[in-house]
Amino acid sequence: MTTSPQSLNRRQLLALATAAGVGSPLPALAQSKYPGGKPVTVVVPFAAGGTTDILGRLMARHLGTRLGGTVIVDNKAGAGGGIGAAVVAKAPADGYTLLMGTIGTHSINQFLYKKLAYDPARDFAPLGLVAKVPNVLVVHPSQPYKTVKELIAYAKAHPGKVTYASAGNGTSIHLAGALFEQMAQVDMVHVPYKGSAPAIADLLAGQTSCSFDNLPSAMPHIKSGALRAIAVTGSARFPSLPQLPTIAESGLPGYDATSWFGLWAPAATPPELVARLNAEINQILNQAEVRQQMLEQGAEAAPGTPQQFSSFIQAEAAKWSKVVQTANVQLD
């Protein structure tokens, strides 16, 4: 789906990014003129406290150190991440406004919304995949079900009584729930919020029954016992929670819903800045302490080239377009 705007420079860009990853020098222009004393803004298109925000702030802190300048985070929530994404799409292509985007902003929203204020392929230059994150099915401790099979049985016996909170209509959390409903053949009620943090806040208060939340934002509440984790949504168990089964092995074979997060710049960003930023992102993600910190929070670092990221986005778009169509989810 997404193609790097610098298509004429693909080989050069790949070579630069690959070389930078093993410590080779970058172009003098990228080194000498950027960031140039001007603050870099990372737009997070969801509310503070959610997984996108957690990862965005982590990357911003390390980018600031590596670039030798100030990198700030600006939360612009709404429309399943679409408001913040549109801001970056329309920003000057000078490397000073970046997007901490998601599976939603670049592989799902185009199939959900009749109109988008941005084009996920045309308006952005992919910088790099940052992390892959399995969602986790968490429930309020007052709920009677403790396994996937028990939840399915309860939902079938009480149609419309089980509510699941999400970070917003069309987000990966929403579609993970929609996929669960579809495969389990149950009737649950979706309750959308403007971000994962407010969704989890109401779940903690017992206002909703459960959530298919991103693991990093749910992890503290799982560890504290405030929420009961039932299963992870990925195809394999998560390393830091080996005792927690997958939904697939718990009664829904073939179920797989993994979220992911990455960084983008506006489409016309110069190739040397794309290469510079990709190299810095990879250097950060290859740090042992960063990888461990992400793992503890429920995310797996995923360094790579802009071209690899583009191919990955295309594959994800193909997968989730089918899920959206089958689930019959359509937003204005």
Image (spheres, rainbow, N blue to C red):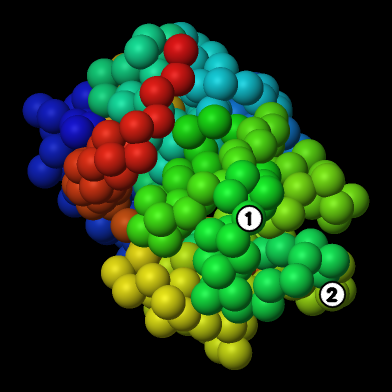
Residue 77 screen position, x and y as percent: 66, 25
Q: Vertically, is 233 above or below 274?
A: below
Residue at image coords 83%, 46%:
207
Q: Residue furthest front?
A: 157
Residue at image coords 53%, 66%:
152
Q: Nearer the viewer, mark 2 or mark 1?
A: 1
- Disc 2 vs disc 1: Cβ atoms closer than 8 Å? no
Residue identified by numbered label 1: 158
Q: Could you say which quadrant of the image residue 185 lies in?
A: bottom left
In the picture, the quarter occupied by the N terminus is top left
In the image, what residue type sits under mark 1?
A: His
Label disc, if present, on residue 225 of the rendered structure: 2
How busy is the neighbourhood of tag 1: few (under 14 within 10 Å), some, or many (20 plus)? few
Q: Residue furthest right?
A: 205
Residue 37 screen position, x and y as percent: 65, 26
Residue 119 screen position, x and y as percent: 32, 17
Q: Nearer the viewer, residue 288 or 136?
A: 136
Q: Secondary structure at mark 2?
A: loop
Label disc, if present, on residue 93 of the rendered structure: none
Q: Residue furthest bottom?
A: 243
Mark 2 or 1 closer to N-term? 1
Q: Nearer the viewer, residue 260 or 152?
A: 152
Q: Say whether residue 214 is visible.
A: no
In the image, what residue type sits under mark 2?
A: Gly
